[in-house]
Image (cartoon, grey):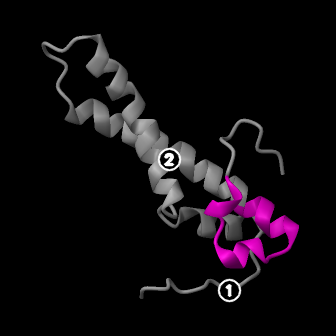
Amino acid sequence: MATSGLPPVAPTTLPADVRRAPVAEQRAYRAALSFERVLLGQLTEVLSKSALPEDGEGAAPQVYRDLLPEALADGMIAGGGLGLARQLSRSIGGATTPPTPPENA
């Protein structure tokens, strides 16, 4: 499964059950997590444009504002994402392992 246009996924962001799964399931989950990362990047970009005023600011605040959506999306993915990746990986035929309930539930 080619994910050349998607951001790379660090192995540490994969849940333990996915790391123990067959390679095909890991690839499907990585592709789904990469897609979730792109989606989060787009959503946070729209959010930041609607939430931050642009009046009277110099170039430095604009640079930071441009970096905020990507940093926020990266942080969300590093924290486990929204849970879309598990559902997406199942729908593309990768995950056969039953879902593991959250540890703090």
Is label 2 in contact with label 1 (beta carbons under 8 Å)?
A: no
Q: Nearer the viewer, residue 34 or 76?
A: 76
Residue shown at 77% from the left, 38% from the top: 4
33 relative to 78 in the view: left or right: right
Q: Which mark is residue 98?
A: 1
- Secondary structure under tag 1 reads loop
Q: Which segment is the magenta one?
A: 10-29
Q: Quadrant of residue 59?
A: top left
**75 shown above or below 20:** above
**Element type where label 2 sits in the image:** helix
Q: Nearer the viewer, mark 2 or mark 1?
A: 2
Tell me: residue 73, above or below residue 76. above
Name the residue rendered at 67%, 51% in the picture: 9
Q: Position of residue 58 (x, y in %)?
A: 23, 11
Task: Find the distance from the CA under tag 2 to the CA under tag 1.
Answer: 26 Å
What is the quadrant of the C terminus in the image? bottom left
Q: Residue furthest left?
A: 56
Say which residue label 2 marks.
74
Give the residue at x 71% y 35%: 5
Task: Count the marks.
Answer: 2
* 18 drawn magenta: yes
Q: Mostly what secondary structure, the magenta segment?
A: helix
Q: How far across and how far down the image is residue 80, in percent?
A: 52, 64
